[in-house]
Image (cartoon, helix red, strand yellow):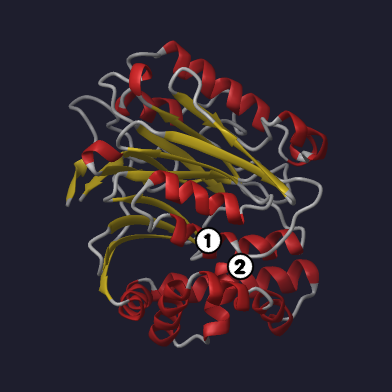
Amino acid sequence: MLTRAVKKKGENLMKNAKEFKLIECRGTPYEIGRQWGEGCKENILKISENICNSMALFYKASKEEVVSNAMKFLPAVQAFDPYLVEIMRGQADATGLRLEEIFTQKCFNELTFYYNNISGLCTSFAATGKATQDGKTILGQNIDFLPGTPIDLLKIHHANGLVQFILSFSNSSEFTLSSAGIGICANATIGQDYSFNIPVGCYLPRVMREKNIHDAIDILKQVVRGLGYYHLADINGHMSGIESIHNDFELLYPERDMLLHSNHYLTERFKEVDTALQLQPDSYHRLDRIRSLLDQHYGHINTEIIMKILADHDHHPDSICRHFNPTVPTSSTTVASFIMVPAEGAIYIAAGHPCEYEYVRYEF
């Protein structure tokens, strides 16, 4: 169900009214993949072209070389999640791409690091209990990456009854709210070493098909290896974050009913290998800023307050609401923003900078 954009009379009158096209998919994994591929064909083809062009331009890597590097991960993925492989087969048949090309998209994050082309930055939060106005869990983030990065919005109906809203980022990462009452946020964290086993784009889907947050976290503990921070929060107020390096992980727990993160490690023993100071130095300010703003509204945090916080421009352009910086070779910008309220089965999405675009509410 889609409801009107979140805008009260007299407020945000200058914001743009824009929303993602909602693609609904159902049936077997293969059927879901076909419907996904048909509904998002233009973006999926664009993603394939973007990967090849960027790798060729910056690293003189041929398409077949890039695909070959990605395919090294396929045996582990087939064993880990055959359900996802069937979805990819459906996407391939619907778009006319080879399965290998679709799989390469799922490995986009790993290829980015393999070829040292690092661009992603995000700021995320989760709050519940005493921190929020009504005690309900709220979580979300700004998604920051290169301007024009394709994003698709899907509503997936699985045969076992689970329904998901998925913001699919370059067909490689998924920001998901499920009807089981679980939501997820993700941020890039980068150590000096990283280990590849199962790509991010191939383990997040299985994590978010779990119907229990504890089972979802257990899967993350098995597979995270240095390429991202995640936190999960559910309808019952359970929240956990997880940081990792190439050979270790650490669970993070809420303080004062809040979990906050940007792009540097909070785990003390991981700080000696953290590259954020060199690659993402504004991460420290963004985390301090979102903590300060949430502290100001502690006990009264609601979706309207969060919308304003995610549009914050302190330290612009490298702010929570991030804007393109022409002085940086591969500058990120906020390409979308979302807020999830699991108890309401609702996700609010701004299809661009939250300072410029209205949030639209979708619900199960």
Count residues near mark 1 (Cα–Cα under 10 Å), then give few for <14, some for 14-19, many for 20+: many
Judging by the rendered image, the residue that carries numbered circle 2 is: 107
- Residue 237, quarter of the rendered image: top left
Residue at position x 57%, y 83% in the image: 100
Q: Which sits in the foreground, 85 or 53?
A: 85
Is residue 345 depicted above or below 118 in this figure? Answer: above
Residue 14 in view: yes
Residue 49 in view: no
Is residue 42 depicted above or below 256 in this figure? Answer: below
Q: Amino acid at mark 1?
A: Tyr
Q: Which sits in the foreground, 197 or 361?
A: 197
Count residues near mark 2 (Cα–Cα under 10 Å), then give few for <14, some for 14-19, many for 20+: many
- Residue 3, quarter of the rendered image: top left
User: Residue 66 in the image: x percent, y percent?
Assistant: 70, 76
User: Residue 266 in the image: x percent, y percent?
Assistant: 66, 30
User: Residue 115 in the image: x percent, y percent?
Assistant: 76, 64
Element carrying mark 1: helix
* Relative horizontal placement of residue 98, taking residue 325 as reference (left or right): left
Which dot marks residue 203? 1
Q: CA distance from mark 1 to mark 2?
A: 11 Å
Is residue 152 depicted above or below 80 in this figure? Answer: above
* Relative horizontal placement of residue 124, taking residue 359 as reference (left or right): right
User: Residue 140 in the image: x percent, y percent?
Assistant: 42, 38
Q: Amino acid at mark 2?
A: Cys
Element carrying mark 2: loop
* Relative horizontal placement of residue 61, taking residue 208 as reference (left or right): right
Q: Which badge, 1 or 2, is on the more N-terminal residue? A: 2
Which dot marks residue 256? none
Q: Which sits in the foreground, 81 or 296?
A: 81
Residue at position x 61%, y 65% in the image: 198
